[in-house]
Amino acid sequence: MKISTEINSCAKLVGEEKAIELYAKAGFDAWDFSMFNMCLWDWGNSRPYETDHPLRGADYLKFARRLKQIGLDNGIVCNQSHAPFPVNNPYTQSYLKRAIECTAEAGGEICIIHPANDDTPEKNAEFYHSLLPFAKECGVKIATENMWNWTHKNGLDQAAPAACSDSISFNAHLDAVNDEFLVACLDIGHAEMKGLNTTAPEMIRALGNRLHALHIHDNDKWHDSHEIPFSMSLDWNEIVKALVDIDYKGYFTLECDQYFKNAGYTADNAFEGAKNLASAAKKLAKMFEESKK
Ligand SMILES: [Zn+2]
């Protein structure tokens, strides 16, 4: 089982180029191209921040090629990417083809594009259909992901259903599109949030061979903590067992994007954080291989 990780949280400390190098040296097989800076969302003002990030500029493909090369020079590949979100606005939508194009340029095979949280499977299918011909031209699959809303009502402070948040909604989204270029990315942490009445093992089994990608992180079975596996409450034995049961063939991709911040890493010791992430991912990969026997 090959291991990968998102690069955004480490890149905040050392930049994308260095993050890929550190992850390669830490023992990852691949890197997940975080593209949030392409259209970084200002939630307060409901529009993207204007930044001079290269993914927003004219030379975005050059930047993707450079990252690919840094990976290859250090012996790792880009396995998947994460497009900007939220997708329910014209600003972000105008960058999604660019995200697919950059995925291909970096050598990635899957671009994770969130569904719109509050849209029906049919409405989201229209959205995915508008991107699929371009994705096919680029040879990149699109993965949809299980989302969540948050409710503060009636004394409740917990997650609430959203697009793909449970097995029925997730499979309904895949059925509505019905195209082999639209696959599933299961966010393991989201599947275990209180209020959704789902578990990651149950969703893994319900998705079966439609599951091509993962966002792996730990939480307290309530909040979306995005922490390093084995540090909080998720039952990794059960999760790995379910992945073995469906004969999962994708990468084990971490999305522990709060880890560097919560643990107080800086540019000077980011490599220690990268090594800890790699050992958690390797432990999961080993559990997977051993439980296959
Ligand atoms: Zn995720």
Image (tube, rainbow, N blue to C red):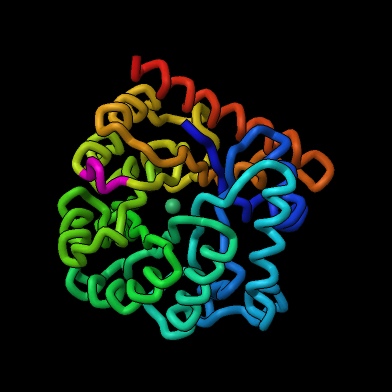
Image position, residue 14 (x, y; %): 77, 53
Image position, residue 62 (x, y; %): 69, 71
Quadrant containing the C terminus is top left
- Residue 40 shows in this picture: yes
Residue at 46%, 31% (x, y): give it: 1
In the image, residue 208 lies in the stretch drawn in magenta: yes
Q: Which residues are magenta?
A: 207-211
Image position of 93 (left or right of 173): right
- Helix, strand or loop for the magenta stretch, by majority: helix
Residue at 42%, 62% (x, y): give it: 140
Residue at 44%, 48% (x, y): give it: 224
In the image, residue 192 lies in the stretch drawn in magenta: no
Image position, residue 92 (x, y; %): 47, 78
| Res 36 → quadrant | bottom right
In the picture as drawn, the residue positioned furthest to the right comes out as 268
| Res 76 → quadrant | top right
Image position, residue 43 (x, y; %): 51, 73
90 over 143 or under it: above or below = below
